[in-house]
Amino acid sequence: MNLVEKIDLPNNLVLQVWDKSRAIASNTTKVELLIVINVEIRKEYFSDPAHFQQVVAVFGQEISYEYTKERTFVSTPDSKSVFDELLEDFIRDSLPYISRTDFPACFAMSKLRDIRQHPYRYRDRA
């Protein structure tokens, strides 16, 4: 896994672009793009302090947004261009949303919703 680049976003988050591609046969590669953004959980994202405590109890002080896109059985000479295409698609389609100033709060609130909708997933962590 290789860190390709870091992009500073307007909302003060840092987007990390990882290349997880690997050879799967003599002339074939599995091309895999991984995007990681670490988001600090803050009290001001929640209207109720108990909600903040609940999310921190389950996930810790920082949560990671992760996006993965892959293509299998890519000809090895084409793997770089396929990776670049996957990255361009992400930047075009998802970067505007992730760059919004309210993204960190929305992401933290989505974790609270997940805890409430699926408490059985987090029984051992809370």
Image (spheres, rainbow, N blue to C red):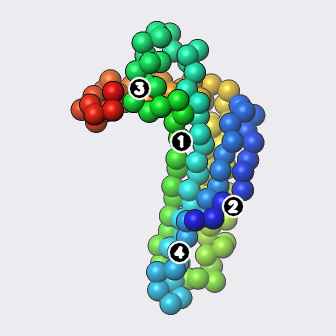
Quadrant of the image for the C terminus? top left
**Cα–Cα gap, marks 1 and 4:** 23 Å
Q: Amino acid at mark 3?
A: Ala
- Compare marks 2 and 3 and give the one earlier in the sequence: 2
Q: Are marks 2 and 3 in contact (CB under 8 Å)?
A: no
Q: Amino acid at mark 4?
A: Arg
Q: Residues within 10 Å of mark 2 (few under 14, many from 20)?
A: few
Residue at x 71%, y 31% (from the top left corner): 11
Quadrant of the image for the N terminus? bottom right
Q: Is residue 4 left or right of residue 1?
A: right
Q: Are marks 1 and 4 in contact (CB under 8 Å)?
A: no
Q: Secondary structure at mark 2?
A: strand
- Compare marks 1 and 2 and give the one earlier in the sequence: 2
Q: Secondary structure at mark 1?
A: strand
- Compare marks 3 and 1 and give the one earlier in the sequence: 3
Q: Which residue is mark 1?
A: 65
Q: Which mark is residue 22?
A: 4
Q: Is residue 7 left or right of residue 29?
A: right
Q: Which residue is mark 3?
A: 57
Q: Is residue 112 above or below residue 81?
A: above
